[in-house]
Image (cartoon, rainbow, N blue to C red):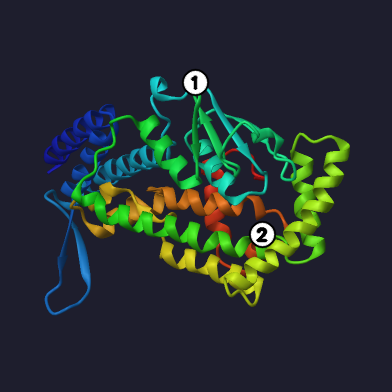
Amino acid sequence: MRRASTLASSVLSRTLTSTLHDGGALSTIKHRFLLASLYSTTSNTGSSHSRRIFNPFSSSLGVAGALVSAAAAASLSQDVLAKEPPRAELVPKEVVLYQYEACPFCNKVKAYLDYYDIPYKVVEVNPISKKEIKWSDYKKVPILMVDGEQLVDSSAIIDKLGNKIHGKEIVESASDKDDDDEEMKWRRWVDNHLVHVLSPNIYRNTSEALESFDYITSNGNFSFAEKITVKYAGAAAMYFVSKKLKKKYNITDERAALYEAAETWVDALNGREFLALHNLSKLPCDRYLWDVLFVQQGGQSQTLADLAVFGVLRPIRYLRSGRDMVEQTRIGDWYTRMESSVGGDPQG
């Protein structure tokens, strides 16, 4: 038995070594089938409970199997949690973002750029004069200039930039479709619902409106006179705009609407660290083993929906509305995970 154990351990060791030296998705797939070969699940007769047996070797191989499983899971975790920078030749040479510091759509684009480690320059637009975008026929922000090409509308910017930085490498398959549908559903929810509850909260009263514009002017490249004008004129204007938005979207209680949106998102996560498991979770494998060795070690990757929700919430996170949201809802843990993985300016 000892000889059999030694032989099996040797085989497992060679398999793991080979797996760890392969790259990319192929490496991850090998990890998954390696794990699947180690464990299987059977049901006890007359019982709804399951027992997990080591297969096909005897229990004397438990230590070797555990070591292999832990190493594979750790490698899986590293593969998935690592940022996904584009190939160097696909990274744009010059990226300039024209933005308002507190604009949720602008911050959605910044979250995407930060996550993929794409260097970019920020031009803060004066919300009163808009002199920084006089050259453009498009008079809204964000505007993203990518190697001289103008991209507009935050969701379209992300889609087009994604095509640029990933080249032709993205391959869609039927197994990806369900995940993509869920991702798109929540991206639309961000654009059509979540963003509309933000302004009524940010500019809920005069003190919160001034707090927001104090933050905006402290980050923008404004002269002293411009700072005063933007802060007080902008705060007053947005206070009244927020009241119109509140009426337009039938919001009776700003904070309640914000808290409900935050809880809706947490419910969508359904206990996951991010919106969806990595698509490789669809490969055949013992569900228990997957959960223990992969999910519990953080083996989940951010979707574009995660980045969108995080991006639009980032400018309010450290304002009064954002602090209230984190204190009164369950969204704080997810936000902290996103803040850690996306990087960039933690203050938005």
Contact between labelled residues 1 and 2, with CB atoms less than 8 Å apart = no
All told, the count of numbered labels is 2
Q: Position of residue 41 (x, y in %)?
A: 17, 61
Q: Position of residue 325 (x, y in %)?
A: 64, 64
**SS for dot 2:** helix
Looking at the rendered structure, the kind of residue marked 2 is Gly
Q: Position of residue 25 (x, y in %)?
A: 27, 36
Q: Picture quarter containing residue 46?
A: bottom left
Q: Picture quarter containing residue 1?
A: top left
Work out whether residue 228 can be spotted.
yes
Quarter holding the C terminus?
A: top right
**SS for dot 1:** loop
Q: Which residue is mark 2?
A: 322
Position of 140 with respect to 173 (left or right) is right
Nearer to the camera, 234 or 54: 234
* Dot 1 crowding, Cα within 10 Å, few <14, some 14–19, many 20+: few
Q: Residue at x 25, y 34 (%)?
A: 27
Q: Residue at x 21, y 51 (%)?
A: 175
As measured in the structure, the alpha-carbon distance from the residue carrying label 2 to the one carrying label 1 is 35 Å
**In the figure, 220 relative to 298: above or below?**
above
Q: Residue at x 41, y 21 (%)?
A: 88
Q: Nearer the viewer, mark 2 or mark 1?
A: 1
Looking at the rendered structure, the kind of residue marked 1 is Lys
Which numbered disc covers residue 93?
1
Nearer to the camera, 59 or 118: 118
Nearer to the camera, 59 or 135: 135
